[in-house]
């Protein structure tokens, strides 16, 4: 077992990495241009990324011990982060008539964010 607070560095660095990846995804490809305006939401998004990192750290830390193999960490953290970044958004298309194309774009983005988060945790998992 690894305490979640001892994983503060991967929590912080994964939030920064996801923030940067999401900035690239939202600025360069054209598929998100009509989805949102930019502004104060960026700070909230960063805090949201930190929170997802904390959830992922808690679950992986409870399941895995120090020195866990990179792929084991990647699986636990990646699955947790994917669910946090994407699954809750699916109901917006089911109940609130958000277009499925937007939901699918967000799901792909969430997969990228989950892989980035999992990669950072796997890299920085304590020995």
Image (tube, helix red, strand yellow):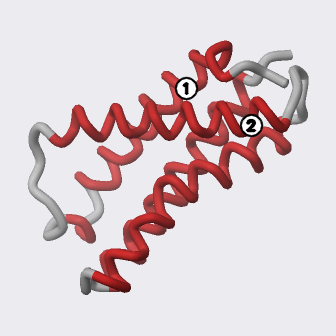
Is 103 rendered above or below residue 77? below
> Which quadrant of the figure has residue 21?
top left
Measured in 3D between alpha carbons, the distance from the residue under mark 2 to the one under mark 1, in whole angstroms, is 12 Å
Quick one: label 1, few (<14), some, or many (20+) residues within 10 Å?
many
From the viewer's perspective, is 97 left or right of 52?
Answer: left
Which residue is labeled 2 in the image? 60
Mark 2: secondary structure? helix
Expressed as whole percent of the image width and height from the top left, the position of residue 119 reads: 66, 39
Task: Please tell me which residue lies in front, 11 or 4.
Answer: 4
Q: Which residue is drawn at 68% across and 43% down?
A: 77
Is 95 rendered above or below residue 13? below
Expressed as whole percent of the image width and height from the top left, the position of residue 35 reads: 18, 67
Instruction: Tell me, for residue 11, which label it has, or none.
Output: 1
Task: Please tell me which residue lies in front, 58 or 42.
Answer: 58
Q: Which residue is drawn at 30% across and 40% down?
A: 45
Q: Given contact means CB atoms under 8 Å apart, are the residues at marks 2 and 1 in contact?
A: no
Expressed as whole percent of the image width and height from the top left, the position of residue 84 reads: 51, 53
> Which quadrant of the figure has residue 111?
bottom right
Q: Quadrant of the C terminus?
A: top right
| Marks 2, 1: nearer the viewer | 2
């Amino acid at each position: 077992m690894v305490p979640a607070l001892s994983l503060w560095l991967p929590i912080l660095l994964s939030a920064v990495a996801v923030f940067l990846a999401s900035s690239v995804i939202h600025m360069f490809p054209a598929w998100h241009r009509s989805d949102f305006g930019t502004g104060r939401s960026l700070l909230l998004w960063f805090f949201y990324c930190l929170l997802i990192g904390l959830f992922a750290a808690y679950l992986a830390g409870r399941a895995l011990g120090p020195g866990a193999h990179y792929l084991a960490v990647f699986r636990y953290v990646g699955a947790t982060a994917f669910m946090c970044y994407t699954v809750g958004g699916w109901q917006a298309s089911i109940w609130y008539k958000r277009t499925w194309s937007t939901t699918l774009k967000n799901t792909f983005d969430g997969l990228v964010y989950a892989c980035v988060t999992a990669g950072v945790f796997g890299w920085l998992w304590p020995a």
